[in-house]
Image (cartoon, grey):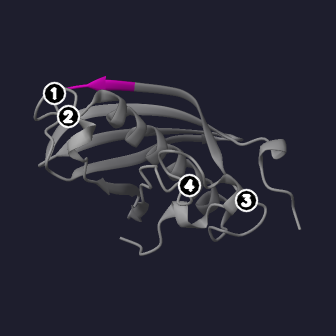
Amino acid sequence: MTSDAFQDFYPDDVSHCYGCGRLNAHGLQIKSRWEGDESVCIYTPQPYHTAIPGYVYGGLIASLIDCHSTGTASAAAYRQAGREMGTDPALRFLTASLHVDYRKPTPLGVPLEIRATIKEIKGRKVVVTSRLLAEGQACATGEVVAVQAPEHLMPPKP
């Protein structure tokens, strides 16, 4: 895997997301990286992420898939453009659609692995498919339609 997380390249003005914002001290602060043509995020839920004793709350699962997918969309757009992440203008993506299928209960107390691939890149839209694994077992799958953030939501250009 590459060493730098996609989220580490987000401009400060758009790094406050609860799921992936590195500047949100109370957030999840997930980190996503390329591993070949797949992106990977490892996240270990805390005991307070409980749905029922011993299992992860479904909202956390959706958040992990969501934020990992938008980060993957951003990284894929940079790749497609032949640009290094962090170069201007910033390519930041937002969720237009999130679909999650819960396949089996997700256990607490183990690292979760989210693996994503690019299904489609077309203009300002990227479709990302994901699998959330616990101990090698697929517990959830997801698809995110991510769209490039409009200019008025991005930090002003220097």
Distance from disc 2 to disc 1, alpha carbons, whole Å, reads: 5 Å
Distance from disc 2 to disc 3, alpha carbons, whole Å, reads: 33 Å
Residue 96 place in picture, x, y as percent: 60, 29
Residue under label 2: 139
User: Quick one: label 4, few (<14), some, or many (20+) residues within 10 Å?
Assistant: many
Q: Which mark is residue 60?
A: none
Q: Which mark is residue 90?
A: 3
Q: Which mark is residue 104?
A: 1
User: Quick one: label 1, few (<14), some, or many (20+) residues within 10 Å?
Assistant: few
Quarter of image, res 21: bottom right
Instruction: Name the amino acid, label 2.
Output: Cys
| Range drawn in magenta | 100-104
Asked if the magenta segment contains residue 79, the reply would be no
Q: Are marks 1 and 4 in contact (CB under 8 Å)?
A: no
For mark 1, give the secondary structure. Answer: loop
Residue under label 4: 76
* Mark closest to the chain's N terminus, 4 or 2: 4
Q: Considering the image in quadrants, where does the C terminus appear?
A: bottom right
Residue nearest the observer in this picture, 151 or 48: 48
* Mark closest to the chain's N terminus, 4 or 3: 4
Distance from disc 1 to disc 4, alpha carbons, whole Å, reads: 29 Å
Asked if residue 21 is positioned above or below residue 34 in the image, the reply reads above
